[in-house]
Image (cartoon, rainbow, N blue to C red):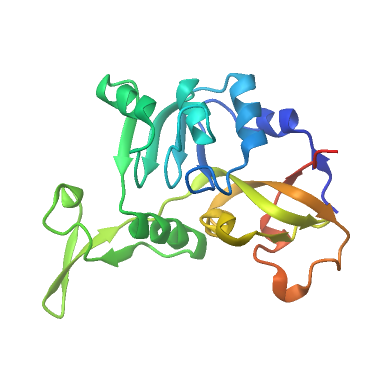
Amino acid sequence: MKPALTAEKAAALVPDGATVMIGGFMGVGTPRRLIDALVAAGVKDLTVIANDTARPDDGIGRLITARAISKAIVSHIGLNPETQAQMIAGEIEVELVPQGTLVERIRAAGVGLGGVLTPTGVGTKIAEGKEVLTIDGKAFLLEKPLAADFALIAAHEADYVGNLTYSMTAHNFNPVMAMAATTVIAEPGLIVPVGAIPPDGVKTPGVLVDHLLERLH
């Protein structure tokens, strides 16, 4: 059984300067209570790996507004003008990665691959400084794995040993991130007894999950 932590105790596990993966897609499937606790704790200098930076004061955008992030590795920042302003001012480093490449780089770390080959970005600025391999006459970029110190993920349900389910599109990046971090903290909507989740309904097995956030009463 995994004891459930308060959001404050979970946030206290994340030190300044950590590399953190955060699940979600424009806030959908994002662990909002964990993010709120990180903002309240005043954590700084995070490197965040995520699909996007959401909107100001929504999801990951709350960390941007709090200036808790020094580098963001994301697929886009188009709906968060605060991220754009900080990038232009040189207050945050933004590495833009094509969405498919981003998820494959995370998956590569999770399954122990040395990288992935993709034609996406060949001949563009994305290719600058990267190794280009030619296979069967076609050029591919070698994209290296992305791993993290922590993965903060949102789940629909967890059981007492940490098996997780996700709800529809809130699935998004959460399961793959749970495979690619040293410490995984899950924020479930419900915590249910072992056996309440059918075996074929488990999307992230409890062996990957280190901590559960206690559910709201």
Which residue is depicted at the point 45% across and 45% down?
50
Quadrant of the rendered structure where residue 134 is? bottom left
Q: Position of residue 108 (x, y in %)?
A: 43, 62
Quarter of the image for the N terminus: give it: bottom right
Which residue is depicted at the point 65% across and 62% down?
204
Q: Is residue 37 visible?
A: yes
Quarter of the image for the C terminus: give it: top right
Which residue is depicted at the point 79% across and 67% down?
197
Q: Position of residue 124 (x, y in %)?
A: 13, 52
Q: Position of residue 2 (x, y in %)?
A: 82, 50
- Nearest to the observer: residue 112 or residue 19: 19
| Left or right for 95, reference 103 | left
Q: Residue furthest right?
A: 193
Q: Is residue 17 visible?
A: no
| Left or right for 20, reference 157 | left
**Residue 99 against residue 31 in the figure, above or below:** below
Q: Position of residue 185 (x, y in %)?
A: 67, 45
